[in-house]
Image: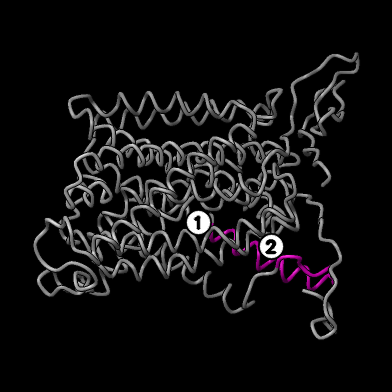
């Protein structure tokens, strides 16, 4: 795979020329031969890294802690919301995958929007994703503080938040290969814990030992009339839960961000996208079903992780502490991915002239160090929020993150639709990783994403997300008008790396390819 040299700065420094480093990552060297600051990422992520990075980002706080809020709103019917949401996310990821295989660049969907929807859309999309990762990370560090409170209830939560911000920032300054390995092992711990919980929970339900809660257990608990049945809060409850459900899936789009650092993006991106979304959906639905078969849904009040509650209910003394360690690992993994995704997106924005040029500088290991520092500084806001309003902060943050998440998904879908029509119109080579059920499924996914944005404005506890989102978009429009100049106002110039593919005769298109 050819290494991508980043686009030049709008006003390149005189005397600096691009040069290929020994490992294939471009660096900068002055005319007199002295090394200058590198400005390129390095391709060091394998399929294993990318697959587990996406799992690590999406299987985290949303499942281990945020699921309690969704269960409160919809009861057992929250399973329907997760199934619908998971299918929509799969379509978003397939759209992103088709774009990423055609244009495997850093900045991902920010640059895709810049090419197919215009530079203003690229600017808004890129910065909204960075905002999304910041807000999601705020939720994750908040959850981390809550988890630590399980063991140390007398220590203020903000102290833990401060400590984790500095720790994760330090991890993100290592090379991308080190980052990928850490994320792989973080995610392995989570996946093993989830599988063990599902298997153990099913064993508890089947054999009935250790259950200490009153009322029905097993499948009957999902339909128990004493707790309101399967849909205790009606259709309105299911709709209200989408704000938290979609937050839980947020972050999976980091797969697209990895395209600029994947060792073989045309191979690893499709594999990761095809496997991860369905696995996440399986984990969420099975896990929450098992939880609600053991612990009555109306007893899951959000004061503790539902996972910890399960093992408390079956009377295993050490299990809650063990599981608390697992959910802490999950939070670490999610925060790690959040900072990675935001940093790489801001790096791509700098390449397009949409962010300060300093954001495009990297360390000798190919890490965009300035963006890591900026994210860590922004996360210090979480320290303040957890100090002044520790109660109720999670739902507010999750709602705002949901708006940013679904807005980014909306831009991905719109960019993909525009790309498909442009490719067909220009008679370019067919996609090597096309979306399924085109175009019906793509338009249905688009309609659902718009519906989720509307849902945020329908309920009092999530309406703030729509207000904050509208203000954020207005500020971005103003910033683009006042601050972006030169190449930042031209569409992203991306190389189409689609290669010819051999199709069986019965599958060969007779007209222009899509």
Sequence-first tag of 1 and 2 = 2
Question: Which one is in front, 486 or 151?
Answer: 151
Residue 308: x percent and y percent?
A: 25, 46
Q: Residue 72 vs residue 284: left or right?
A: left
Say if 73 sits above or below 477 in the image: below
**For the stretch drawn in magenta, what is the main secondary structure?**
helix
Q: Residue at x 89, y 15 (%)?
A: 33
Q: Which residue is mark 1?
A: 407
Q: Quadrant of residue 135?
A: top left
Q: Which residues are magenta?
A: 409-433
Q: How is the image coloured?
A: one colour
Check residue 419 for magenta coloring.
yes
Q: Quadrant of residue 15?
A: top right
Q: Residue 129 vs residue 18: left or right?
A: left
Question: Which one is in front, 1 or 357?
Answer: 1
Say if 123 sits above or below 249 in the image: above
Q: Are marks 1 and 2 in contact (CB under 8 Å)?
A: no
Say if 193 sits above or below 10 in the image: below
Question: Which one is in front, 329 or 42?
Answer: 329
**Residue 120 visible, this orientation:** no
Q: Which residue is mark 2?
A: 98
**Residue 228 visible, this orientation:** yes
Question: Which one is in front, 28 or 90?
Answer: 90
Element on which disc 2 rests: helix
């Amino acid at each position: 795979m050819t290494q991508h040299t980043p686009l030049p700065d709008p006003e390149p420094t005189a005397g600096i020329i691009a040069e290929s480093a020994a490992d294939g990552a471009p660096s900068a060297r002055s005319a007199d031969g002295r090394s200058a600051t590198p400005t390129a990422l390095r391709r060091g992520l394998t399929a294993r890294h990318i697959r587990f990075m996406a799992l690590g980002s999406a299987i985290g706080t949303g499942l281990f802690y945020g699921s309690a809020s969704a269960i409160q709103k919809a009861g057992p019917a929250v399973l329907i919301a997760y199934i619908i949401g998971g299918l929509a996310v799969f379509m978003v990821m397939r759209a992103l995958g088709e774009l990423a295989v055609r244009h495997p660049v850093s900045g991902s969907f920010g640059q895709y929007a810049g090419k197919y929807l215009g530079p203003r859309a690229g600017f808004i999309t890129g910065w909204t994703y960075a905002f999304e990762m910041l807000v999601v990370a705020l939720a994750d560090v908040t959850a981390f503080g809550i988890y630590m409170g399980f063991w140390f209830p007398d220590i203020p939560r903000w102290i833990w938040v401060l400590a984790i911000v500095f720790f994760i920032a330090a991890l993100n300054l290592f090379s991308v290969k080190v980052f990928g390995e850490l994320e792989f092992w973080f995610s392995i711990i989570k996946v093993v814990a989830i599988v063990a919980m599902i298997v153990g929970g099913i064993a508890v339900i089947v054999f009935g030992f250790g259950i200490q809660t009153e009322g029905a257990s097993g499948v009957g608990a999902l339909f128990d009339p004493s707790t309101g049945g399967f849909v205790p809060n009606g259709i309105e409850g299911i709709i209200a839960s989408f704000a938290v459900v979609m937050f839980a899936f947020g972050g999976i789009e980091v797969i697209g961000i990895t395209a600029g650092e994947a060792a073989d993006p045309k191979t690893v991106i499709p594999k990761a996208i095809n496997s991860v979304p369905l696995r996440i959906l399986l984990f969420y639905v099975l896990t929450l079903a098992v939880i609600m078969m053991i612990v009555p849904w109306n007893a899951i009040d959000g004061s503790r992780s539902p996972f910890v509650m399960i093992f408390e209910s079956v009377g295993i003394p050490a299990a809650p502490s063990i599981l608390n360690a697992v959910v802490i690992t999950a939070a670490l993994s999610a925060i790690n991915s959040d900072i990675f995704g935001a940093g790489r997106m801001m790096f791509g924005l700098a390449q397009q002239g949409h962010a300060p040029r300093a954001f495009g500088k990297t360390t000798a290991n190919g890490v965009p160090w300035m963006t890591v520092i900026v994210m860590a500084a922004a996360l210090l806001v979480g320290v303040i929020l957890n100090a002044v309003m520790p109660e109720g902060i999670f739902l507010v943050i999750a709602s705002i993150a949901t708006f940013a998440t679904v807005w980014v998904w909306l831009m991905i879908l719109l960019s993909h639709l525009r790309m498909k029509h442009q490719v067909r119109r220009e008679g370019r080579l067919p996609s090597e990783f096309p979306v399924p059920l085109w175009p019906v499924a793509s338009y249905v996914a688009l309609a659902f994403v718009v519906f989720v944005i509307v849902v945020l404005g329908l309920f009092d506890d999530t309406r703030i997300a729509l207000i904050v989102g509208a203000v954020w978009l207005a500020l971005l429009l103003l910033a683009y008008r006042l601050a972006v100049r030169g190449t930042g106002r031209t569409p992203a110039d991306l190389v189409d790396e689609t290669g010819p593919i051999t199709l069986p005769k019965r599958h060969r298109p007779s007209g222009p390819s899509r």
